[in-house]
Amino acid sequence: MRLERVQINYSIYIAFIQVYFLLFIACSFRGVDFTSGIKQIGLAVTELVIDQLRRICGSASTLTSREDKICYSYDGTPLFYQEPEAILFPETVEQISEILKLANQEKFAVVPRGAGTGLSGGSVPLKDSVVLVMTKWNKIIELDEANLTVTVEPGVVTGDLQKTVEKSGLFYPPDPGSSNVCTIGGNVAENAGGLRGLKYGVTKNYLMGFEMVLPTGEILVSGGKNYKDVAGYNLRDLVVGSEGTLGIFTKILLKLIPVPQRSITITSSFGNLTDCGNSVANIISAHIVPSMIEFLDNTTINCVEDFTHIGLPRNAAAMLILEVDGRGDVVDYEANMIMEILKKNNAEGIRSTSDAEQANTLKTARRSAFSALARKRPTAILEDATVPRSELPVMIEKVRTAAAQNNVVIGNFGHAGDGNLHPTCLIDENDKAEVDSALRAFDFIFNEAIKLGGTITGEHGTGLAKKHFFEKSTPAPALNLMRKIKSAVDPNNILNPGKIFSNSPKCESLKLS
Amino acid sequence: MKNPELGIIRAALPDDEILTKCIHCGMCLATCPTYDLTKLERSSPRGRIQLIKAVADGRLEITPTFIEEMSFCLDCQACETACPAGVKYGRMVESSRVLIEDTKENYAIPDIVKKIGLNYILTNNLALRTVAFLMLLIQRSGLQFLMMKSGFLKIFNKNFNEYLKLLPKMKFKTTRGLLKGVSLKPERSRYKAAFLSGCIMDVAFSDVNLDTIQFLLKNDCEVFIPEKQVCCGSLHAHNGEMKTAFALMKKNLDAFLAEDYDYLVSNSAGCGAFMKEYGHLLSDDPVYSIAAGKFSEKVKDFSEFVHLTDFQTKLRPPDETVTYHDACHLVHSQKVSQEPRQMLAKIPGIMMENLNESTWCCGSAGIYNVTRYEDSMHFLDKKMQNLKNTKADVVLTANPGCMLQIEYGIKKYGLKMRIEHPATFLNRLIKE
């Protein structure tokens, strides 16, 4: 690695420190995050490198204009911006492999990107990096109705895939909030969850196989259409949720299930949060598994209603949107049981519908929650703390405490059935004091979640946004093993370096926000 | 190109609140026709917002790529419908177009033609009628046919023949001419509706205007057509000519304030959408702010008005199947999509076919189909495929731009279909 190599030669070391220092000053003046790109400090993406990238991808697929750099300096995560040096749209597996080999040779970072809707900064570029965009890989390669699988390219939009397989009576359940926009490649890389996680699981439960270009440029194929396969390590579970740090997907094989015959959607509102939390806990302990239990607090209800105008209960302290699905009478039976439990917990305005359109309107409204909260203030910072389901009522209360103690507005909503909450802090990112209060509130929330046996992220990933908390809260043996895996797969640390955790130089974790 | 002073940029661009509202979540990407075409962030709403922000912050100059992206945008505002955060994207893009026009130093011939058309012809009823009459002569005398056949127009531009086909067919009589002898006061009057006869509507769609007015009269509405009204100014605002737009807006306010009325009925989605914006645009004006606010509140699209006031006449069942295309300025700018459908559903025995992606822009977008003909054809292509699949006999839409574009599409793709304004369709079904 560069740092080790330069230490041998004393004079180069001095020169390096000088350059580092000058750049540090320059970067601090420009307000740019300096530390995340420490390893690539030598401005590795030179004109020469860009020429070589053009030769690999073709000049039409290599964008270097200032306008394009601005337009790929962000994803869906607030507060993180960094312009890349080039944006690439490779078309073949070989081109991707060539790019990664060149990155190893010239020591620049490659950041993979799908639709750029991630919420932890997984696809935000790093200093001196190139972005590799996969949105044009949008073909559904094969729908195997005999084996109930589908093979897709990584740029296929999740919603498009769902619509396509549903035409054949099949079902791909993972359903992140951005499903109309986000891509399967990003879903696998982030192990995306969504509204149906409670009954149907998340992306990892549907990944059967993949083709991936490793950071060294090798092409890896693993898994297949076998329902049972225990040969060797389970590489699928290693790459799912790897946040683009272990390889770039070029083909993905997914499991499908039959479409549920029918479903009933139930809504109800609550005068206080305790009744709401207890309802969820009672439903779970009554051994009912709804396909969805979504929770919205008063702030969220009002913002969503401002956008959708569908008549949500503006005065309620909280509301639940539940869905049960399956075959025949079982659905009615479970729906009735749920409504009984809701009544016992003082729920108001309990309504149920089996009309698909109405159900869809409600789900669309719920999916818009995060963005709708941004109506209130310029910046909405969304977090993803998750606790064991039984602890949900406690966690909801802790979020309220965090908001009150730090004097910030937090809208809370989430997948209550999974214990997966999305407390969203509403601030103005230009107000430094407010940003600090928000970070303190999240610090409190994360610590409380961990005390309750929870985790800092249920489905959004660690990326840049939660890296600091991740490194703090993960036991050393686990963190060290992850670091070892990363350096074994990516010895030069060129693929999405510094995401999830830092590998080597400790100074990288200086960054707080 | 000179880098203009930061102050000028700040003045032209929307205030910070509008600029910072975008949280770049990406929910808009799926609804953007230009992003769908290029799959490039810079052709997406959130990409364009980041570019506008960069210009406003002084991080980016007004570069050719910036100008290109702002003019590539259809301003269909489908992203506004999709945006949960309530970002006013249309205002941002229109402001950046004003900025681009203000800082332009050299004009090409098409720019000059556009400027003359917008600033000198559409603003003046006499000039508009003179030009319309000349166009009528060219169109009806066979001169246009000869010009197109001879192919000499292709010297100017290879698509010139197509531009001519896209232009509206001028009518012999304007709205007023058609209304000679018609009493605008029905025997029984439930409402008094003011009516904007428009600019292009007045010379090229006077028949649609007549149908609208006749339908209103049959439904016991008194109609008030102010003498001194002018073009609403929407085409100017969408093309960066804000000064002219303001002058037109004020003239209209003076004209319409002459009498009291219940609603202002618009049969052109573009005009209706812009007139609903008068209140916001003039909110800082010391003289007109209150009047503009009241004026905008009374503006209703034809379908909104009919749905609100209900039919009073008996209609006969139509013998053709119908489909409905949402004009962007109706569904996205005015958020009116249920009313026209509910209005049509009240027609006895109507056979409605659902149009897939009915809210996706047809590519007309004001004068976009002439200024950016080739791009516009990509969007038309998608629209025509969807229309073809409906197998409907009539497609209804409430905007002159969409009507011209889809009519052109029907001929281009050889479909057996007719485009009609809902007012014409309804008026034809009235039982005598």
Image: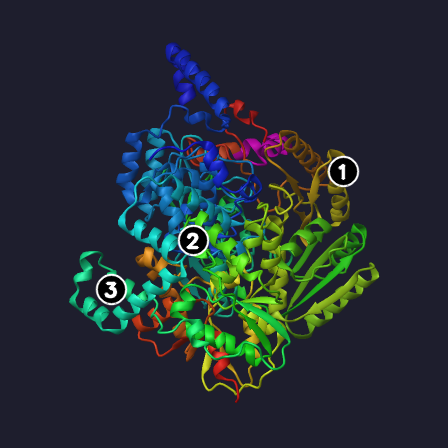
Residue B319 placement (x, y as % from top left): 46, 87
Quarter assignment of residue B261: bottom right
- How far from the left and from the top, in percent, is residue B23? 55, 44
What residue range appears in magenta?
A465-482
Q: Where is residue B320 in the image (x, y as percent from the top left)?
A: 45, 84
Q: Which amino acid does label 1 sit on?
A: Ala
Distance between the alpha carbons at the discs numbered 2 and 3 = 25 Å
Kindly identify which residue carries mark 2. B236
The tag earlier along the polypeptide, 2 or 3, is 3
Q: Is residue B386 above or below residue A402?
A: below
- Mark 2: few, some, or many residues within 10 Å (few <14, many ≥20)? many
In the orientation shown, which residue stands out farthest toward the bottom? B432
Q: Is mark 2 on a helix, strand or loop?
A: helix
Residue on which disc 3 sits: B161
Dividing the image into 4 quarters, which one contains the N terminus of chain A?
Answer: top left
Query: Mark 3: which amino acid?
Result: Asn
**Residues at circles 3 and 1 in contact by the CB criterion of under 8 Å:** no
